[in-house]
Image: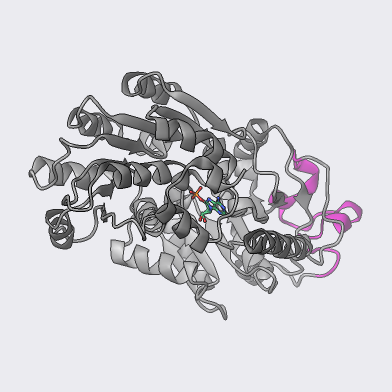
Amino acid sequence: MYFTQLKISDPILKAITDLDYVDPTPIQVQAIPPLLEGFDLLGTAQTGTGKTAAYAIPLLQKIITNRSSFQAPTLTSLIVAPTRELAAQIGTSIKQYGKYAKVKVSVIFGGVPKGPQIHNLRSGIDILVATPGRLLDLADAKLVDLSRVNYFVLDEADQMLDMGFLPDIRRIISKLPHDRQTMLFSATMPKEILSLAGSLLNHPVRISIGSVQRPLAAISQSLYRVEKENKAALLMHLLKDKTILSALVFCRTKNGANRLSKKLLEQPYNTEVIHGNKSQNARTAALKSFKAHESRVMIATDIAARGLDISQISHVFNYDMPQTPETYLHRMGRTGRAGEAGITISFCSRDELSLLKDVQKHIRMEIPVLNCPLAFPPKEAVAQEPEVTRQNNPFNKNLEKKQPRVDNKSLSPRREPFSSKNHGASTANKASEASHQIFGERQKYRGYKKTKTSK
Ligand code: AMP
């Protein structure tokens, strides 16, 4: 199916053609027609499926159709997203889709001064993208008028729930007119979200794209068994591989992310860090530099696990295993965007085994285990341990079988309850092989887009 068959008006078609979109993605095929007809929608969609355009295109089309060109902009469309970065990204996409439609879009979120946002709101807007806290602040101060919103999108609803935003969301909803079209998107549908959907949506069309239990097929997954204290050395070793063009590294805590970034400071590539304790300006600058590929590595907490669309992230590293299995899928969804391939590599230490078990149960597959390629001990260990020889190298699992372990019981493979499946026969870096594969695939994908466009 082509976009032209979806009855989309010319200014929007022209804008998406500029973006090289040819075929609508499955969620766009399913969502655009009912949304244009005015139905509410409940969407379960994996990240990177083209969800933003699926709701933004009908929204823009309605504004173009219903507003005469003489009429001043009126806030009729509200999109609420859980994180500042996601709100900014949605705003950018909508501006791109609406660039020939003379529609005014504004984005508001916390952590930055209110002044410029208030100025924008006062100058008149059609579409507002907001995070819940700042939206309520400005609405309570009567600086934003929600009384004419007739198109409301709640994006990444399950993340709102995880971040404790549901009471805020209910307050926002209480400020909206009853007569409106509502869309709720969520990567998963826990019962709290289903109950919110029940109270919010009116006979919605239900769309589910792909299984949220399953990782995208285009993303290759693998795992290193590595003790906590060796993770930084392993990461630095893997990053020597030049085919890792762009790596997003997930840490569990803000402190952990800071500690790791200090370790990477001396490396010959730029590293960014993004987490909730960073100022909004620092977060925006980090993301900008990583998106522009000026920095090769971005270390992040799960603040960056969802929604963010950064093209060409070749590798996602789970430096710390995610606390919930769903987060595993969200993190890996940062690579393999829009049909491209990607690689996810997890580092699992002994105390994270139960988390790994949960992930594998959730995705209903075993993640292939690679041989740890380190031929050296971590820095801290050098001071305490005797010189590492082929015999006592704690990273060499194969030799380990022949030689009794020297002194580091915690690394003993015999006590490892992991799967015995080992797909990493060569330590010459499976990640590298996979990278070659990916970028071959990516070329194909690009070629595909181009051929289609030139038709
Ligand atoms: P989203 O899931 O909305 O974050 O979109 C993921 C990525 O897919 C973004 O980079 C979009 O620009 C891209 N995208 C969305 N729709 C299409 C399409 N129909 N064709 C090609 N790329 C698309």
Please identify the quadrant where the N terminus is shown.
top right
Colour scheme shown: one colour
- Between residues 49 and 211, which one lies in front from this camera angle? 49
Residue 159 in the image: x percent, y percent?
41, 38
Tell whether 350 sits left or right of 395. left
Using the image, determine if residue 8 lies above or below residue 443.
above
Q: Quadrant of the C terminus?
A: bottom right
181 in magenta? no
Q: Please indicate, yes or no, whether residue 266 appears anywhere in the rendered image.
A: yes
Q: Is residue 327 visible?
A: no
What is the magenta range? 389-418
Main structural element of the magenta stretch: helix, strand or loop?
Answer: loop
- Front residue of 294/181: it is 181
294 and 373: which one is in front?
294
Asked if residue 397 lies in the magenta stretch, the reply is: yes
Of 93 and 261, nearer the camera is: 93
Name the image quarter holding residue 445: bottom right
Q: Position of residue 255 (x, y in %)?
A: 41, 57
Residue shown at 81%/60% (left/top)? 396
Residue 250: x %, y % from top left: 52, 54
